[in-house]
Every structure is written in structure tokens, then in C-alpha cells.
Image (cartoon, rainbow, N blue to C red):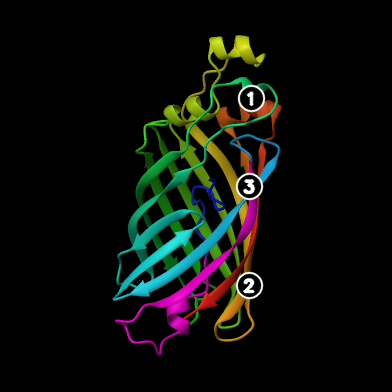
Amino acid sequence: MRIILPALLACTMLLPDAARAQQAAPDDAAHGMVAIGAGVVPDYDGASDVRPVPFALADIRWRGVSFEIRGLRARVDLASDARLAIGPVIGPRMSRKDVDGPVGLLPEIDMAVEAGGYVGYRFGGDEFGQGSVQMEVSLLHDISGTYDGLVATANASYAAIRRPDMMLSLDVQTSWANRDYTRTYFGVTSADAAVSGLAAYRPGSGFRDVGAGLTAGYWFDRHFGVIGRAGATYLVGDAADSPITDDGSRWQPTAGLALSYRF
């Protein structure tokens, strides 16, 4: 299933610090926030249509370690510093199957499993993090043999509002992919061109996209709230020039809404 916050997911957000909001909780007891809902993402890389997917977020701190979920991607923050974040990441990249039109005549792509790491740092902000800027870089490699490539993502987020009952953050991001990734998801071989009617295309490595998004949250009381996310990336470089993208769209929107619980 596709990750609602791609490459970093995509795409890292400045969520409310649930651990700080629950300062009364003892350090050896798990505390944090979970949110579960639904969203929409592009049907496949370069598609013009969207499909529904689960939308999940979580920040759970236990014994000094933070366990986090962004979409269907999980990661662990091993840093004890409140401003530094570093650790491993793992998650799926959705398959391309049951597609209509010429792209549907291309070979199907199985779901990939990506693993790697990330590092980030938060600058400025008050005691709740309002006004802070978080910079983050992640590097993921396919460990499932689906595309055997690398995807790197850089992200910057700004916490415009960050209070115990409300949050609003803005983010921008860009990602880079090597040729193994681009040729799997955006390439068309001569044989596939003859079958599909699309032009043969052999992309190389380079920047894949640029994007921006907005995340907002509101808590009705100490425990329950709602979190929403809307954003889009714009394909650039060889990914944008692909006949697969020409058949679909350079714009890749994502959106999601989830009910949240703090504990």
C-alpha cells in the first residue's frame, strides 16, 4: 500500500510533541500520540488518478526512545537530545498493478520494501516548539529486490502554531533517485514500447520532485483530537519527461484525515 507521506515520506512533519504534553508521565511508561484515518495518494508514480489508502501517524516515547509511524513507514529516533533526531527507517513502496490505459500494458511492479536511515535537527522555537524549523535528510534503499535502487529526501518544516490544543506546520521537500529507481518506475523498454504504444525511454539518476504541504491538528480535550494533511509534489527531471508521466500527470497530490489519541 502506498505511503500517504511519500519519501518522507517523505516527508516529515512537525507534529505536536506528545511526549512534552504528557510531562507528568513517568519516563519508563510509554506515552505519546497515535492517529488513524484515511487518505488519498496517486495511483502509481506519475499517475493522474488517486486511490484511497490508510493514513496513520504515531509518536510513542518509551524509556528515552521514540517510535514513530508516518503513513505506513516506521522509524525509531535513538537520539536523547530533544532537538536532534537520528535512527533507522523501514517501510513499503506500493506496487503498480491493475492500471488502466497504456501504462497498464507495461510489466507490473511488485511492492518494494525500503530501509535506511535519517537525521534531523530542530532550530529555535519556544517551549512547545512554536516557531521552530526542522531540517531532515533520509536515505532509503530497496531491500526487496523490486528496483534495487536508492532514494534520498531532504525536508524542511516550520511550526507556525504549536500549542497543547492546536498545531499548524508547513513543509517543503525534494527527493533524488538513482537510475535503478527511475528506470523501474519511469522507464519504458523497446519491447514494452511495442506492446503499450508508449515511446521507449531510458531515464537516468537525478532529482525526482519538489513539493510542499500543510499539516493541521486540533485537540478537543487532553486525549482526543483530529489531524489533517494536504500536500503535493511536482515531478521534475527524467521522471517528469517520462512517457508514463505524460500519460498521467507531473502533479502528485496527497491528503489525509485522522482521529488522534494522546496518552
Above or below: residue 12 compared with residue 205: below
Residue 177 x, y percent position in the rendering = 46, 35
Marks counted in the figure total: 3
79 displayed left or right of 211: left
Decide which of tag 1 and tag 3 comes sooner along the chain.
3
Q: Which residues are magenta?
A: 14-42
Element carrying mark 1: helix
Q: Residues within 10 Å of mark 1 (few under 14, many from 20)?
A: many
Q: Nearer the viewer, residue 91 or 18?
A: 91
Crowd class of label 2 (few under 14; some 14 to 19; many from 20; radius 10 Å): some
Q: Are marks 1 and 3 in contact (CB under 8 Å)?
A: no
Q: Amino acid at mark 2?
A: Val
Residue 252 drawn at (x, y percent):
65, 43
Mark 2 near mark 1, Cβ–Cβ under 8 Å?
A: no
Quadrant in which residue 26 is drawn: bottom left
Q: Which mark is residue 41?
A: 3
Residue at 34% over, 38% down: 143
**Kind of residue at disc 1:** Val
Between residue 160 and residue 41, name the one nearer to us: 41
Q: Which residue is mark 2?
A: 226
**Residue 161 in view in this figure:** yes
Q: On the picture, is 183 further left or further right than 105?
A: left
Give above or below for 247 relative to 12: above
Q: Is residue 174 magenta?
A: no
Residue at point 41% right, 56% down? 74
Distance Cα–Cα, label 3 vs label 2: 20 Å
- Identify the residue position indicated by label 1 in the image: 103
